[in-house]
Image (spheres, helix red, strand yellow):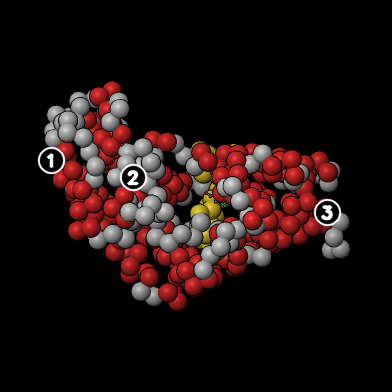
Amino acid sequence: MQRVFSGIQPSGIPQLGNYLGAIRNWVRMQADHECLWCVVDLHAITVWQDPQTLRRQTRELAAALIACGVDHRRHILFAQSRVRAHAQLAWIFNCVARLGWLNRMTQFKDKAGKDRENASAGLYVYPDLMAADILLYHATRVPVGDDQRQHLELANDIAQKFNHDYGSDFFPAIEPLILGPAARVMSLRDGTRKMSKSDPSDQSRINLADEADAIRLKIRRARTDAEPLPAEPAGLAGRAEARNLVGIYAALADLTPDAVLAEHGGKGFGAFKEALADLMVAVLAPIGAETRRLLADPGHIEAILAEGATRAAALADPILAEAERLVGFLA
Ligand code: TRP
């Protein structure tokens, strides 16, 4: 069975886009892989985080992941900072990666923005830590969004250079599993922008713990145009909001947009939004209820994460030890 690793930033309870774009795929991969799911708090502090908020958002994310179906018993769910080996292997990789490689990373340029001199050194070596996350477990399959493709290429470069420099074939090649744009969920207020936790308008997104009433209201208020739904996807051209709602419906129902339009084509948005809200409440209400139930007992979530860290460390420690031996540290 192939080993899978993926990481997600602790930004609290996820929104619908995270669920349809990433988390739901993680849950499905659990059927035929051995999976490690990591809340990447070391990556989070590459930009300023309020300590109380970071702690709360780590618990919230873990609770939501479990509520979505992440199986912390058969697989491993843990917080990155609690397995020391991540930081230790990342240091070795800081010494393997070349400045020239890091200088090409587009995410650093985006995140550092204009004031690059003021970005943290951690943000710069973020991809080295990400390589360590994966290679520490000899994981070979990594589901990520398209924006992480460049980081995985860098991870493969690091693995190859390590192997070459230390005359070994210790680290395996990583296969990126790029999660398709099929499940790309856009803002409910502007169909050309991604649904995002950082959008100032809560009306722009569905949060996984939203109550049924809130979900219905947000869908009813979602921006649309005045035309009825077309009978086939070609009729969605130039209609970003209509395309988004059809896409969300299709993803939630596990149908193609074709099939959704075959059923709903010709309807006005009033009727379609009603059907979409019903479907969304049916899928999300149990997840929201379970997330809230889990969060009512923070000690329980913390115990789950502590157990995950113990099991992750048991896998990571021998791999770190061998990397250290290859580097020439005293055994
Ligand atoms: N950088 C990833 C993101 O922002 C999160 C991440 C950290 C990750 N470490 C990882 C993803 C290892 C896959 C594998 O989405």
Q: Position of residue 26 (x, y in %)?
A: 45, 49
Q: Amino acid at mark 3?
A: Val
Q: Is residue 312 visible?
A: no
Q: Quadrant of the C terminus?
A: bottom right
Tell me which numbered mark, 2 or 1, is placed earlier along the sequence: 2
Q: Secondary structure at mark 1?
A: helix
The disc labelled 1 sits on which kind of residue?
Answer: Ala
Q: Nearer the viewer, mark 1 or mark 3?
A: 1
Q: Secondary structure at mark 3?
A: helix
Q: Is residue 234 visible?
A: yes
Q: Residue at x 32, y 64 (%)?
A: 290
Q: Earlier in the sequence, mark 2 or mark 3?
A: 2
Residue 60 as seen in the image, left or right of residue 170: left
Question: How far is disc 2 from disc 3 in space, using C-alphas?
Answer: 48 Å
Query: Relative to 141, does residue 312 appear above or below in the rendering?
Result: below
Left or right placement of residue 176 versus residue 188 in this view? right
Residue situated in front as seen by the camera: 10 or 102:
102
Which residue is label 3 attached to?
327
Q: Closer to us: mark 2 or mark 3? A: 2
81 vs 22: above or below: below
Q: In this picture, is 205 found above or below 311?
A: above
Local crowd size for mark 3, using a 10 Å CA cut-off: few (<14), some (14–19), many (≥20): few
Q: For the image shown, how many numbered marks are present on the structure?
A: 3
Q: Distance between the Cα atoms at labels 2 and 1?
A: 20 Å
What residue is disc 2 on?
A: 187
Q: Nearer the viewer, residue 205 or 10?
A: 205
The residue that disc 1 covers is: 271
